[in-house]
Image (tube, rainbow, N blue to C red):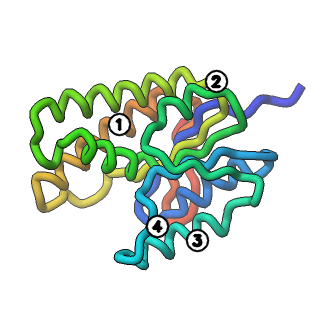
């Protein structure tokens, strides 16, 4: 009897490390995949972002369905084909904005904590095969601004929690994946 692939796989790496390409390779043998894009849709004001999104789209097989959302809990709780979540870094940035963290809105920290708790709970309970991508922040430079440090700290906590609830964790550096768990 062949071994079943791990249900929850977390792929970390720095910017332009090859983490997304590696995550996609983990699912290439699947007939269909729900590709969950957590970033903002590209617009004419940011052609570099549009080029990156186009590159990601061009690598995906035609049978992969793209879902653009920050609402990851229903995706993780749903049954269906395997899902690839790319990426938790852009998810967190969007959620911090939605929660009012940057504007220092009343209750923003509580809303953010609830959103992160909800994501981690849904990740741990997911019945479908899921692969998530995120930027590793532990070996990067210390951001020069308080908001940059806040984001780095929040992402580090999120990454640690998701990694703890994952069967496999990979770190991709210079295109080379290393299994951490």
Q: Quadrant of the C terminus?
A: top right
Task: Locate residue 150, reporting x and y percent.
Answer: 18, 46
Task: Locate residue 84, reporting x and y percent.
Answer: 60, 45
Q: Mark 1, mark 2: which one is toward the viewer?
A: 2
Asked if the residue under mark 1 is in contact with the one under mark 3, i.e. CB atoms within 8 Å, the reply is no
- Res. 9 image quadrant: top right
In the picture of the structure, the residue carrying the numbered disc 3 is 55
Q: Mark 3, mark 1: which one is toward the viewer?
A: 3
Which comes before the other along the chain, label 3 or label 4? 4
Decide: few, some or many residues near mark 1? Use Cα within 10 Å; few <14, some 14-19, many ≥20: many
Instruction: Find numbered disc 1 in the image and state the secondary structure of the residue it sits on.
Output: helix
Q: Is residue 63 left or right of residue 67?
A: right
Q: Is residue 44 left or right of residue 99?
A: right
The residue lying toward the viewer, choosing from 178 and 113, is 113
Distance from label 3 to label 4 (Cα)? 13 Å
Q: Mark 4, mark 2: which one is toward the viewer?
A: 2
In the picture of the structure, the residue carrying the numbered disc 4 is 16
In the picture of the structure, the residue carrying the numbered disc 1 is 158
Asked if the residue under mark 4 is in contact with the one under mark 1, i.e. CB atoms within 8 Å, the reply is no
Task: Locate residue 111, reporting x and y percent.
Answer: 24, 30
Q: Is residue 26 left or right of residue 14?
A: right
In the picture of the structure, the residue carrying the numbered disc 2 is 127
| Identity of the residue drawn at 55% across and 57% down | 20
Which comes before the other along the chain, label 1 or label 2? 2
Which comes before the other along the chain, label 3 or label 1? 3
Q: Mark 3, mark 4: which one is toward the viewer?
A: 3
Asked if the residue under mark 2 is in contact with the one under mark 1, i.e. CB atoms within 8 Å, the reply is no
Asked if the residue under mark 2 is in contact with the one under mark 3, i.e. CB atoms within 8 Å, the reply is no
Above or below, 84 relative to 114 = below
């Amino acid at each position: 009897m062949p071994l079943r692939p791990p249900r929850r796989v977390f792929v970390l790496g720095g910017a332009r490390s090859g983490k997304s390409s590696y995550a996609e390779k983990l699912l290439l043998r699947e007939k269909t995949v729900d590709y969950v894009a957590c970033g903002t849709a590209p617009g004419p004001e940011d052609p570099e972002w549009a080029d990156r999104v186009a590159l990601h789209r061009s690598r995906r097989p035609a049978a992969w369905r793209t879902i653009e959302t920050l609402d990851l809990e229903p995706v993780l709780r749903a049954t269906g084909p395997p899902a690839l979540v790319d990426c938790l870094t852009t998810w967190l940035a969007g959620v911090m904005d939605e929660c009012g963290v940057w504007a220092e809105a009343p209750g923003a920290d509580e809303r953010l904590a609830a959103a992160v708790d909800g994501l981690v709970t849904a990740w741990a309970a997911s019945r479908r095969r899921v692969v998530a991508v995120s930027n590793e922040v532990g070996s990067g430079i210390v951001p020069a601004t308080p908001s940059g440090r806040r984001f780095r700290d929040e992402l580090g906590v999120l990454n640690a929690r998701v990694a703890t609830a994952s069967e496999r964790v990979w770190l991709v550096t210079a295109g080379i994946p290393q299994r951490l768990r």
